[in-house]
Amino acid sequence: MMRTGTFATIAVLLGAAGFLLPQVVANPYYFYAGYVVLQYIVIATGWNILGGYAGYINFGTSAFFGAGVYTSAYLMQAFEAPLVVQIVAAALVGVALGVATGYLTLRIQGVYFSIATLALVVVLETVVHNTEALGGASGLTTIGPPPPAWFKGQTQYVFCVMLVLALLAVVIARWIETSWLGRGFRAIRASEPAAESCGVPTLRMKLIACAISGGIIAAAGAPYPSYAYHVEPVSAFGLLIALNALAMPLIGGTRSWMGPVIGAVLLGTIQQVATVTISSEYNILAVGLLLIAFVVAAPEGLLGLLSAVRGGVRWSAKPARKPA
């Protein structure tokens, strides 16, 4: 486990470097691609709080992301709210949606819970399709106010905003992992009946996990209208978002805050490179095949594979006992 002082130093240095980048890098494409990678760090980290720490696999990630996108877009269009207000409002909507969804579905487990979360995507997308105030099927055009002069462009500005969100999400995930919440979540993942028999308030803990996870994922969607200038249901509630949210923590490792970050950086970077050469359909296929490969070859992700390799090296390095 990385020490707190080291972790804080790295976080501050990364944040400072990100805010200096617009002054150093002129090509906006790097910020355009970097925004997507950072966005998936937030989404994967939020997903892992419920799916990794507590062991409840959520297929409805795009429902929370889409809720954040449309909350932000509506506030921008109707009230010209600043981006920070949009992010806070989107996070609150995600928390409320997580609590409501959790209260209705967390009494069921396994595949039944996963199917219930998948149904949430269909429900919210149908609501948006039939709500004129949200643009319906054609979506909303979202053009926000000009960014501060320091950032030299809208893409650079939302990149820095997403960097702050990514750092906050990772800080929250790391705190949860080392706190009483993390211990409770791990107990539920190991054996929910045993945890409950030992006095762990399992339903309350699961609702907390749903609320935090939903709030982080919805916050990840809030800057999207300022980034894309147009939102519509197909992209906001897209399959690729849910698939990446599942794949990235599994590739990196679900038992630590570092796993989703590693998976998001690796898979997100590969996707951004591949986007200029292959279609989005093949992109989804590539993610699916990569996910299958990791589930078969490294079910504990890269961090689990690294721990296994280290353990094997230590074991093999022990001297053999001499015969008596």
Image (cartoon, rainbow, N blue to C red):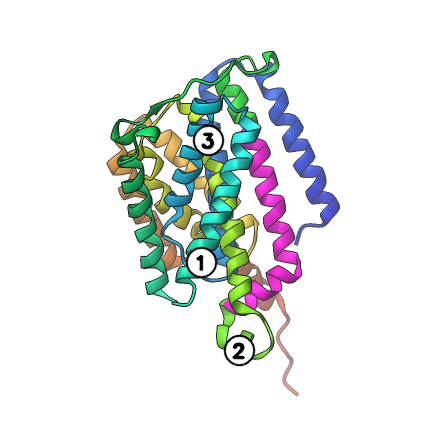
In the image shown, does 136 or 160 lie closer to the viewer? 136
Q: Which residue is mark 3?
A: 72
Task: Calculate the distance from the C-alpha at mark 3 to the C-alpha at mark 1.
Answer: 23 Å
Residue 126: percent from the left, percent from the top?
27, 41
- Chain-order first, disc 3 or disc 2: 3
Alpha-carbon span between mark 3 and mark 2 = 41 Å
Magenta segment: does it hold 172?
yes
Separation of marks 1 and 2 at Cα, in angstroms: 21 Å
Q: Residue furthest bottom?
A: 324
Q: Amino acid at mark 2?
A: Ala
Q: Are marks 3 and 1 in contact (CB under 8 Å)?
A: no
Which residue sits furthest right? 5
Look at discs 3 and 2 and give the one toward the viewer.
Answer: 3
User: Which label was assigned to residue 194?
Assistant: 2
- Residue 169 location, x and y as percent? 57, 43
Specify start and end residues of the magenta stretch as a single range. 161-188
